[in-house]
Image (tube, rainbow, N blue to C red):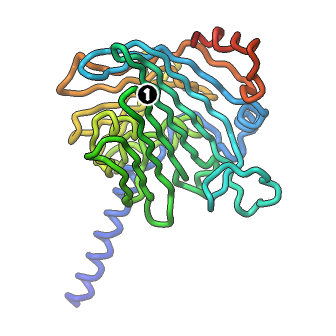
Amino acid sequence: MKSIFAFLLCIFSLACQTSDSQKINSPNQGFPLQTVQTNTEFNDYWYAGKAEITSYDLEQSRYGEIHQGKAAFIFVTEPFSKNKQVKLDYPDAKSKDNVSVLKMNATRKFNTGIYPYSTMQSVFTPIKFKDHPNTLKIATSSQEWCGHTFEQLNLKKTHYDHQLFSYFESEGDATNKLDKAWLEDELFNRIRIQPSALPTGEIKIIPSTIFSRFRHIDLKVENANATLEKGKTEGQMRYQINYPSLGRTLSIYFQKEFPYVIESWEEAFANSPNLVTKASRIKTIKLDYWSKNGTVDVKYRKELGLE
């Protein structure tokens, strides 16, 4: 009898643990949003043959000071190979391998004294996250006059393969594996696809690849606290990630209504309250930018405030 009671108690305990885990990472049911897979508005916006380009005024913390610059987010849907993890040239011929992703190319450009910095991140997140719950790939590069670095994460069955190529001896050329977890770099895509499904509460997350390179620290899974609440203004939401062990907080402000345009973001450190990285939206346009490569098309950069 006692053994049966112990068995039932164990089952009950496990059930409670599963329930708590689901509660911590559950979608925010109160957020007004239709299911993205059947959302005609979503398809009309993201599958119209154009990219969305948003420019930002950037205040970048680096070397103990704030540097002025510009940032840009380019969001576009693409057919993507889940096996090779590259854009498919002929998606109709490889339908079983084709995953529709939202790609974000994020750039930052700023000067530190005499020399310039340029960074770029490419993040590939499946639209139908119920079928493909994890971002498939992240590629990040950073260039400045001292040298450049390149970093990539590729999704495997149980983990992410991580590669780093750097001109610093302490970093060198390295490969390792990271447990599956949320990725900070994918959060911007998640907001654009379905913000109600953002993780909240206590979560496991891999910090930004830009942050880890600027701080020259190893990329690893961290414990963090995530919240989704009203933003600074009416019609705005704030998604915030707090890393207790890093003393770092990332806050992303975005429009509450579709298409959930990202208005601004801030990165702050508890031990450096005066060194806060900020980006504030200048303008958003829809454009087939890949066909706008003539000298006359510089007008679009001026329209975005990037010139």
Q: Position of residue 289 (x, y in %)?
A: 72, 26
- 18 is higher (above) or lower (below) than 6: above
Residue 229 as seen in the image, left or right of residue 169:
right
Residue drawn 69% across the image and 30% down it: 51
Label 1 crowding class (10 Å Cα cut-off): few <14, some 14-19, many 20+? Answer: many
Residue 93 as seen in the image, left or right of residue 302:
right
Residue drawn 27% across the image and 16% down it: 65
Q: Position of residue 305 (x, y in %)?
A: 58, 10
- Which quadrant of the figure has residue 271? top left
Residue drawn 68% across the image and 40% down it: 77
On the rendered image, what quadrant is the N terminus found in?
bottom left
Residue 19 as seen in the image, left or right of residue 44:
left
On the rendered image, what quadrant is the C terminus found in?
top right
Q: Which residue is mark 1?
A: 252
> In the rendered structure, which amino acid carries the disc numbered 1?
Ile
- Which quadrant of the figure has residue 123? top right
- Which quadrant of the figure has residue 298? top right
- 212 is higher (above) or lower (below) than 26: above
